[in-house]
Image (cartoon, grey):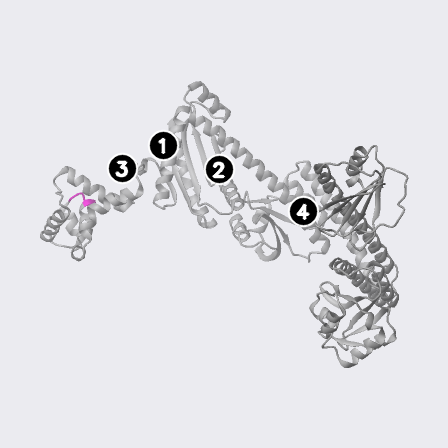
Amino acid sequence: MLQIQPLYSYLNKKMKEIPFQLFYSEHSNHKFQLFHTNSKMKPRDELLPTKRVDDQIQVQSDTEKTQISFFYDDDGQALLRLFRPHVDLAQDELETMYVLFSSLGMENKMKAKDAELASMIESIRSITSSLEPQDVLNKIITQALSVIHAADAGYLQLFDETTEELTSRAAVGFNSKLDETRVKSGESITGKVFRDSSPVIYYSRDEIYAAMADLSAENFRHILAASDSSKLRSLISVPLLLENKAIGVMTVQQYDAEGKLSEDDLHLLEGFAAQAAIAIHNAKLYQEANERLEEISELTKQLEETNRLLLRRAEIHETLTQFSLQNKSITFMIQELNRMINREIFFFDNLDAAFFPKHALRSLCVSQDEISRILNTKKKPFSIHIVDRNQKEVHHYVYPLISDSVSLGCFLIPLVTPISPHDQMTIEQASNVLALEMTKRKTQEEVYYKKTQELFTDLLQYKDPRLLEEAGESLGLQPASFFSVLIVEVVSYTDLQALEAVIHRLISSIKRRISKQGTLIFGFHNKVTILFSTNASHEINKVISALHSHLLEWGDREETPLHAGLSTSYEGFHSIAKCYDEASKSLSFMINRKKTGIMTYKKIGVNRLFLTQPFSEIESFAEDILSPLRSEKAQNNDLEKTLFTYVKSNKSINETAEKLHIHKNTLYHRLKKIEELLQLEFHNPDDFLQILLACHLHETV
């Protein structure tokens, strides 16, 4: 009653000098109930709610008392009786009381719900206290009537799978004639409730009989003989559902009981029926259990074995988790896993393309690239044949480690003997711990990359030599070194988790092919940035030569095209920003031309002049110059081909004619025609420069 305590405090304070009594009735047909008073005076007479006229608040006075009635939309009524003939209360005070007293209805409903819940719990406890099938059925219908107060009769029907009929199995308020009814699915009220698994409620005898119109004559006769149907007032029928399948129907009826059956009663009976269905099922299981004692004994042994495996699972998980918390290496974990299952087991790290233990690569005679390629398509455990060092084909069980659709790696277990349930469980537990360990490691590296990227960005912005030197040294760089920047871009992924894994694998593969000393490498979004630092500029060329073919192979294997831009080598910290700018421009050049591999800034050549120009404008320039050579007549004379050959031959008449397999006079004629169409002259330096640029851009754009 804590929720209406403020109301009582308000009344006690307001009516401090006036004796009062506060009543409430939840329905116009119900008697008033005393909720609160500040006097020892008891009600002299039985109070009944008054009829509402128009207003929500009505005040009545006589020579002894003043009565204030508060009417609510849900048919509830509060009555404040003040033992003074005249009490002056302002309209705003009455309205305040009206709002406060509305909580009495909620309090009353909560009390009713509490009582209803207590009754439900006690009823469920009662029906589950027995496992004898018939005793359970009798208790169900008896307790249902104790829960639904407005009902005074009811019966329970179960579906017979053999006859495909609903038969009465327990009843209260009916004689034995009810047992003779045999209702088919879809017939009458209970048959439809069973068929549709949907409850119904009828509020009158006419509604009930209309719904029974299709009941067979024989069943109708038995039902009429089973009770006094003339007093029938209302009915609720609900399905007994077990795992969403109807097993029977429970029906309650009202004859002489007070109150009305309501939708709330229907929902309450549905909840009770759900528990009743479980109780019926349990009783049935108990009966069947007595007939299958040997089977239960075997089941007990299986449960004991399962429990033993679960305990062992917990031990394994705890052991491996401790290794992870102690920052034990993956090699150590794999060794312990070998010991636990007493058989050889290997692990492949797909992020770093590494085997554990390291001798696994020699034992398996399989490359990291092959395993990685397979894991990119396999997400569930599978089996493969792998040739060992003795050239013997061995069957292996492969258990992938997946995190957010990203392949982290896999276990490889030679199937010299079958994998036992214990071994399977151990591998599953180990996969969970290793997945967490690898995810943690990947997250740490991502944090490192982000921090390195921030420091590198700061270094690019510094102009002050002192700040520049401090930033360079914080990244472990030597000021007197030669620097060069390589930026590698991966075609963007829609799945960011998959993109992070690809960047991680790319960095790992690059690290294995370049010297760690003097090299800074980090990933950010879909790019990998590498800052080379060497004592001599020519040393970088050797690294790039090997890295170029590796990136092309890596992109083909991963089915992920790579674009890369490389700067020129320069000496000193102050040149790093220039290196980064050149690498970015080289990368942009490769992307615009949809080329893969590494492009050095120097190799861009004259195209550097056009890097800042819009791609469409460059195309437009070349098109404007060369378009006259693309008419049907010009194409028939191979004028465009003649021009390109002439330019590539450095305007050599003999070489051009030889390459085109035409006579020199024919070439002269074509060149003259080209000059006419282009309105440009080959001997004019400005005109020839335009022609030369148009041809170059046509081939490079």
Q: Which segment is the magenta one?
A: 647-651
Q: CA distance from mark 3 to mark 1?
A: 16 Å
Quadrant location, the N terminus:
top right
Closer to viewer: mark 1 or mark 2: 2
Magenta stretch: includes residue 650? yes
Report if residue 572 is visible in the image: no
Magenta span has 695? Answer: no
Q: Secondary structure at mark 2?
A: strand
Q: Quadrant of residue 130?
A: bottom right
Residue in the picture at 69% in, 68% down: 196
Please give the residue where the numbered disc 4 appears in the rendered image.
Answer: 430
Q: Amino acid at mark 3?
A: Val
Identified at 39% across, 45% down, the residue is 596
Q: Residues within 10 Å of mark 4 (few under 14, many from 20)?
A: many
Viewport quadrant of the C terminus: top left
* Residue linked to disc 3: 606
- Residue in front for this viewpoint, 147 or 379: 147
State the separation of the CA atoms marked 3 and 4: 58 Å
**Label 3 or label 4, whichever comes before in sequence order:** 4
Image location (x, y in percent) of residue 603 = 32, 38
Residue, far bottom: 217
Q: Secondary structure at mark 1?
A: loop
- Residue 598 placed where, x, y %? 38, 41
Which residue is identified by label 1?
A: 568
Amino acid at pointer 4: Ala
Q: Which residue is mark 2?
A: 524
Gap between marks 1 and 4 measured at Cα: 48 Å
Provide residue 73's location: percent of width, then percent of height: 71, 50
- Left-right relation of 245 to 643: right
- Determine contact: label 3, label 2, CB under 8 Å: no
Q: Nearer the viewer, mark 3 or mark 1?
A: 3
